């Protein structure tokens, strides 16, 4: 049969070769890696990014989302099993993530920059598939909290940090590697965990029996969970294994899996605990103080994940515009599309630069640098609010750059769009993140944070003015009702300060003109004239 038409002007797929170039050309990532003391990891990050760009890995990402996990509450004989069945590619994704240490490498790697190196790898691999990042992040994050019970940490940390993905429910001590989750949110409220009703009854052998429910508990096939429950001494943190040391199943009953907007590859369950055995981590009554150490690590991954999504979006949008013609010219050469792409690229680069700075602060804080710890406390809270919030708007605009193709599943853009809001919701939703900034400032002030901004003083008058304005706002004192505005300005001035010092001049100029000086519209694609859109788009690094 003769063809009815020739297919023209369709965009070629991003080839594996391009994907490799893409990492090498992700200047904000590579520069951030070196600047934050982890240049030694460049080859590892590049190798993982290359694998991520391969057709095979891209296909894993697609399949894992098109075949979401299935809950099996009972076996064929009616016995409860409470297991979740995943498509095999989910395990492939997990295997790569664990083998590359995204789940825990820095806890056994003593090299300076280990958290930064891991952050860069997480960023590269998150662009393949975001959902399986949930148990990977939680496993990474559980370690500092678990150390509040040295005995449990000694027993499980080596297995959590092992680079072997060993799925399936078995006695944790008999496995080659473990994963961990967290179980805090209840029906009556997730932000205010003090309202938790799950009870913990102490037993003569030192363990506790937990009875109650959790409204969200993701990745329920993890081996271990940190769970909040009310003990006699108040809200407390517990380590709960899925399988008990005697091989029996702990009474963690999976009720349902959530039918979610996105994050399809990841199972998020509703759970009931029926006298489930758990061990105290930290002191009774110190539950929030203990589990917040886990939350503080997962918040870093929210920022990295937000930045990774933006990078994916801007790469896809730019690639499309470089190959698609409309009205006789490639889209990328048309001034208004160049404005949109440059605006998206500026947002992406600002997010990546910030994420790497925070990863570096994590390394230095954990090595005992108190100033970096103070910077991280405030900088991360503000960034968790801002970067994750920008991700949704960014994904929407990047999708539109592909026109109708961007609205079609095959492009991958709908998945990016559906996944985008999640990092803003969990680990402290927008308002809660903003209020956390006020709380952190009330406790320790903002001097260290402001010193970071001042490091760029005199380099750009627009940044100087924005920092002066921020000082005035801070002097006015805390006000819950306007907290989002304050936190937004904190995050923007921090991004501006980093870009002015370390970014490409065209990117820093566009950022200061639009985000700090206000010469900008509400939608993306409203950068002022005079901005060097060509240089900014070239910085995305596609050939
Ligand atoms: C896909 C997915 C997976 C999840 N996985 C897990 C998991 O594994 N473990 C777990 O424990 N939880 C998990 N969660 C739950 C998540 O952490 C909570 O949904 C989140 O913390 C918000 O709690 P909530 O849903 O009860 O909302 P609420 O606490 O009721 O908050 C509703 C809204 O009110 C705002 N708000 C709250 N307090 C204030 C205030 N004082 N002032 C102004 N505004 C306020 C919040 O920002 C939010 O926008 C998951 C959620 C999702 C969507």
Image: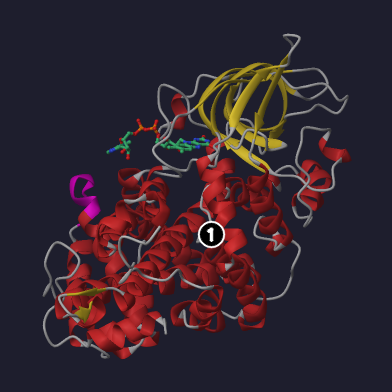
**Residue 365 in sight here:** no
Q: Residue at x 36, y 60 (%)?
A: 387
Identify the image quadrant of the C terminus: bottom left
Count every numbered label the image shows and give the total.
1
Residue 501, position as x, y percentages in the image: 37, 86
Please provide the residue range marked out in magenta.
477-484
Residue 460, position as x, y percentages in the image: 23, 88
Residue 543 lies left or right of residue 98; in this view the side is left
Task: Name the foreground residue: 537 vs 138.
Answer: 537
Task: Name the foreground residue: 247 vs 71.
Answer: 71
| Residue 33, placed above or below residue 521 | below
Helix, strand or loop at mark 1: loop
Report if the beta carbon of the residue with label 1 is closer than 8 angstroms to ligand 1.
Answer: no
| Residue 175, placed above or below residue 513 | above
Task: Name the foreground residue: 199 vs 350.
Answer: 350
Residue 41, position as x, y percentages in the image: 65, 78
Residue at numbered disc 1: 128
Q: Main secondary structure of the magenta part?
A: helix
Q: How is the image coloured?
A: secondary structure
């Amino acid at each position: 049969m003769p063809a009815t038409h020739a297919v023209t002007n369709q965009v070629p797929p991003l080839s594996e070769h391009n994907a490799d170039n893409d990492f090498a050309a992700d200047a904000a990532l590579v520069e951030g890696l070196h600047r934050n003391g982890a240049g030694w990891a460049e080859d590892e990050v590049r190798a993982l990014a290359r694998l991520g760009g391969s057709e095979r890995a891209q296909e894993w990402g697609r399949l894992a989302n098109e075949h979401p996990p299935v809950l099996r509450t009972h076996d064929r004989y009616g016995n409860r099993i409470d297991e979740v069945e995943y498509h095999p590619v989910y395990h492939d994704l997990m295997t790569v993530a664990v083998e590359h240490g995204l789940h825990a490498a820095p806890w056994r790697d003593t090299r300076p920059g280990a958290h930064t190196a891991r952050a860069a790898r997480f960023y590269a691999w998150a662009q393949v598939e975001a959902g399986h990042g949930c148990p990977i992040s939680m496993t990474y994050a559980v370690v500092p909290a678990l150390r509040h019970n040295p005995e449990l940490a000694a027993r499980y940390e080596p297995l959590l940090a092992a680079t072997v993905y060993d799925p399936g429910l078995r006695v944790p001590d008999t496995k080659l590697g473990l994963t961990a989750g967290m179980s805090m949110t209840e029906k009556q409220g997730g932000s205010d965990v003090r309202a938790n009703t799950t009870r913990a009854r102490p037993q003569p052998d030192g363990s506790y029996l937990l009875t109650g429910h959790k409204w969200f508990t993701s990745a329920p096939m993890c081996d271990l969970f940190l769970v909040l429950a009310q003990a006699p001494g108040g809200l407390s943190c517990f380590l709960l294994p899925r399988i008990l040391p005697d091989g029996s199943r702990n009474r963690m009953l999976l009720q349902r899996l959530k039918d979610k907007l996105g994050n399809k590859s990841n199972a998020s369950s509703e759970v009931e605990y029926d006298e489930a055995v758990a061990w105290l981590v930290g002191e009774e009554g110190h539950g929030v103080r203990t589990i917040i150490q886990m939350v503080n690590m997962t918040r870093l991954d929210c920022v990295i994940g937000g930045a990774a999504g933006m990078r994916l979006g801007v790469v896809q949008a730019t690639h499309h515009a470089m190959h698609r013609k409309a009205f006789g010219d490639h889209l990328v050469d048309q001034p208004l599309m160049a404005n949109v792409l440059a605006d998206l690229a500026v947002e992406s680069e600002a997010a990546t630069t910030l994420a790497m700075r925070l990863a570096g602060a994590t390394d230095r804080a954990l090595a005992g640098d108190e100033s970096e710890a103070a910077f991280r406390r405030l900088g991360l809270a503000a960034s968790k609010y801002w970067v994750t919030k920008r991700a949704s708007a960014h994904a929407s605009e990047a999708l539109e750059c592909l026109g109708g193709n961007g609205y079609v599943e095959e492009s991958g853009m709908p998945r990016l769009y559906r996944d985008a809001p999640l990092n803003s919701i969990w680990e402290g939703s927008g308002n809660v993140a903003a209020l956390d900034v006020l709380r952190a400032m009330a406790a320790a002030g903002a001097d260290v944070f402001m010193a970071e901004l001042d490091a760029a003083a005199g380099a750009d008058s627009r940044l100087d003015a924005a920092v002066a304005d921020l000082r005035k706002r801070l002097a006015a004192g805390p006000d819950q009702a306007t907290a989002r505005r304050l936190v937004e300005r904190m995050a923007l001035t921090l991004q501006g300060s980093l870009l002015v010092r370390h970014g490409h001049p065209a990117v820093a100029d566009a950022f200061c003109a639009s985000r700090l000086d206000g010469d900008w519209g509400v939608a993306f694609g409203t950068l002022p004239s005079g901005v060097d859109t060509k240089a900014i788009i070239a910085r995305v690094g596609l050939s």
